[in-house]
Image (cartoon, rainbow, N blue to C red):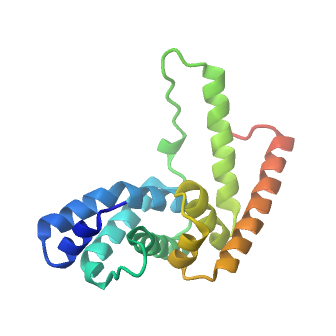
């Protein structure tokens, strides 16, 4: 994700290195926040808060853990706190459909509904299950990285993922039985 030399330079007080470091992780931080919170404005707020926390706490990072795991822990904790403080809201902008020229409109519509069904199913999961699903399948973290990020035992992460996949499968089967939602 980020070169260790850049991290060390940022920790030693090199302002340009710190700015470069924050710019390098900015998209990753936002993407994680968006997948967990499922709201653009909340994700922007959480990402900004995470970047500020990384900026102020960069010296507390120790190379015992991977840098991306350390960053993920910060972002995830902020998102969980934000999620607990506010009820999820739906942005109208998220539901606008833009069709590309030369695209199969039916395929675009069905893809949009399938993606919405999956996102709705993920949103129905309990917070701890949703978080491990996002970190594993959307952020591509290993089981060990998730355990480090969430400060959980490895077997708990495996159990959460197993149960979350079962719940998703049941929820998605319900969507299939009921047809396309929307």
Residue under the point 66% across and 52% down: 120
Q: Nearer the viewer, residue 68 or 95?
A: 68
Horizontally, residue 7 falls left or right of residue 42, namely: left
Q: Is residue 134 visible?
A: yes
Residue under the point 64% across and 59% down: 123
Horizontally, residue 159 falls left or right of residue 36, namely: right
Q: Position of residue 73 (x, y in %)?
A: 46, 74
Q: Nearer the viewer, residue 14 or 35?
A: 14
Q: Position of residue 154 (x, y in %)?
A: 64, 78
Q: Residue furthest right?
A: 177
Up-down relation of residue 106 to residue 56 (above or below) = above
Up-down relation of residue 107 to residue 79 (above or below) = above
Horizontally, residue 34 falls left or right of residue 120, namely: left
Q: Is residue 88 visible?
A: no
Q: Residue furthest top?
A: 102
Residue under the point 26% across and 58% down: 23
Q: Quadrant of residue 165?
A: bottom right
Residue under the point 67% across and 31% down: 110
Q: Quadrant of residue 143?
A: bottom right
Q: Position of residue 35 (x, y in %)?
A: 53, 57
Quadrant holding the N terminus: bottom left
Q: Nearer the viewer, residue 142 or 21?
A: 142
Q: Position of residue 181 (x, y in %)?
A: 73, 41
Horizontally, residue 134 falls left or right of residue 121, namely: left
């Amino acid at each position: 994700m980020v070169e260790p030399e850049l991290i060390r330079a940022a920790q030693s007080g090199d302002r340009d290195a710190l700015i470069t470091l924050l710019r390098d992780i900015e998209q990753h931080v936002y993407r994680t926040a968006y997948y967990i919170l499922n709201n653009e404005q909340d994700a922007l707020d959480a990402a900004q808060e995470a970047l500020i926390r990384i900026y102020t706490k960069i010296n507390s990072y120790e190379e015992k853990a991977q840098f991306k795991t350390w960053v993920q822990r910060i972002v995830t904790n902020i998102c969980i706190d934000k999620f607990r403080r506010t009820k999820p809201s739906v942005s109208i902008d998220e539901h606008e459909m833009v069709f590309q020229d030369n695209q199969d409109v039916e395929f675009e519509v069905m893809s949009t509904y399938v993606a919405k069904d999956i996102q709705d199913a993920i949103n129905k999961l309990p917070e701890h299950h949703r978080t491990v699903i996002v970190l594993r399948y959307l952020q591509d973290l290993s089981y060990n990285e998730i355990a480090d990020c969430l400060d959980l035992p490895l077997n708990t992460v495996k159990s959460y993922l197993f149960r979350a996949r079962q719940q998703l499968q049941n929820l998605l089967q319900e969507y299939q039985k009921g047809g396309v939602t929307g």
